[in-house]
Structure formats: structure tokens, C-alpha cells
Image: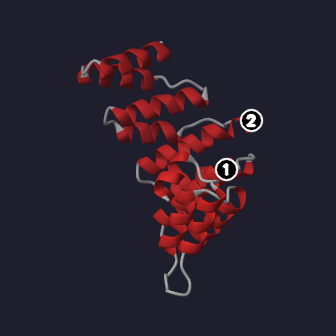
Amino acid sequence: HTAGNLALGSLGWAEGCVREAVAHTLTAAANPPTNAQLRFEIALALVRVGEGLAARRLLDTVPAIPQSDWRVLVNVAGLMRKLGDYAAASSVMEQALAQGANGSEVQHFRSVLYTGQGRFAEAEQALEACLRLAPGHAQAMLDRSLLRKQAFAENHLEDLDAARARGSASSHGRALL
């Protein structure tokens, strides 16, 4: 029933039937499954239909997530950030890191969470880790430049020129460069 209500909620939303979408999505959330990925999908749908508090309640009760599912934790952290709870998102992200999450995007996301909490030194460390893993990560280079005090002798332009010369930035990154 949960998956069906979730599907009906998505269909209602796509058809512009907001009340029906909200009703089906809330019904899907009423008896939440133990499957963490499905809980995340329900919480995401709740946010989409404007039920942020219901999504937060659902995320607060996410069951233990198996170690192989650290990606679910990263997704939950992202949704908590969208709900404006950077501290909770960071806590969930630390769990994901303990379960093996890593990579340039994970490090970049950590920097976003730290920045949202005013933890700028840690944000810069996470950006440095991101750039060690992916030297051409243009968004990380730009974000790092925003965290640093720029001066004529010390700025981010050299890093950007080097990335452009390497051609190592992603297509999105090339657009930023």
C-alpha cells in the first residue's frame, strides 16, 4: 500500500492535483516502512508537496541503515539540509562517512554543510579534500575562493587557469570556468 500511495501521490502532483497528491503522500507516510530507501523517497515526496514537518518526523525515525547503504544516509543528509537543519544533516553525514562514504562530491557536500553552520575552517578542509580527489572540481574551487580572503598576490585565478589548461573540469565545471 505504501508504494502505491507514493506512486498515486507522484501522479497526482504531476497532474496538478495537489490535494490528492498531499493526501496520498501523507497516507504513504502514515505507516512508514522499515526500508530506509523507501522512507527517504516518502520524505522527499512530503517535502515536494509542502509537508516539511511530516518529512522531518519521518526522517527522525529512520531505522538503522545497513553499512552497504551509506548512499541513503547521504541522501537523508541532503534532505535534512533542504529542511534547513544543517546540524542534523552534518550528524547524518558523519554516520555516512563512518560507513565508508567518500569521494569528491561527498567532500564537497560536507563543505556545504559546514558553511551553512558557519564552520568555515572545516568547510575549507573539506573543499581541499574534494580537490585532492578531483583536482578539476570547478565548483569546489569557486566555493573555496569564496571562503578565502582574496588579495592580488594570493587568489584563486591560478587554480582556475590550471584546471582550464588540464581540461579536467566536468561539463558543469567548464561552464563555471
Task: Locate residue 4, reporting x and y percent.
Answer: 45, 12
Foreground label between 1 and 2:
2
Q: Give the crowd class for mark 2: few <14, some 14-19, many >=20 residues within 10 Å.
A: few
Direction front: furthest residue: 165
Q: How many labels does the image show?
A: 2
Up-down relation of residue 61 to residue 165 (above or below): above
Left-right relation of 8 to 87? left
Q: Residue shown at 38%/24% (left/top)?
A: 25
- Percent position (x, y) of residue 126? 63, 64
Q: Is residue 80 left or right of residue 51?
A: right
Q: Mark 1 points at which residue?
A: 95
* Mark 2 residue element: helix
Q: Please tell me which residue is depicted at 60% across the width and 44% down the height of the picture.
A: 74
Q: In which quarter of the image is residue 69?
A: top right
Q: Residues within 10 Å of mark 1 (few under 14, many from 20)?
A: some
Identify the mark nearer the N-term, 1 or 2: 2
- What is the distance, in whole Å, between disc 1 and disc 2 at their CAs? 12 Å
* Residue on which the image places disc 2: 68
Vertical position of residue 119 compared to residue 95: above or below? below
- Circles 1 and 2: CB atoms closer than 8 Å: no
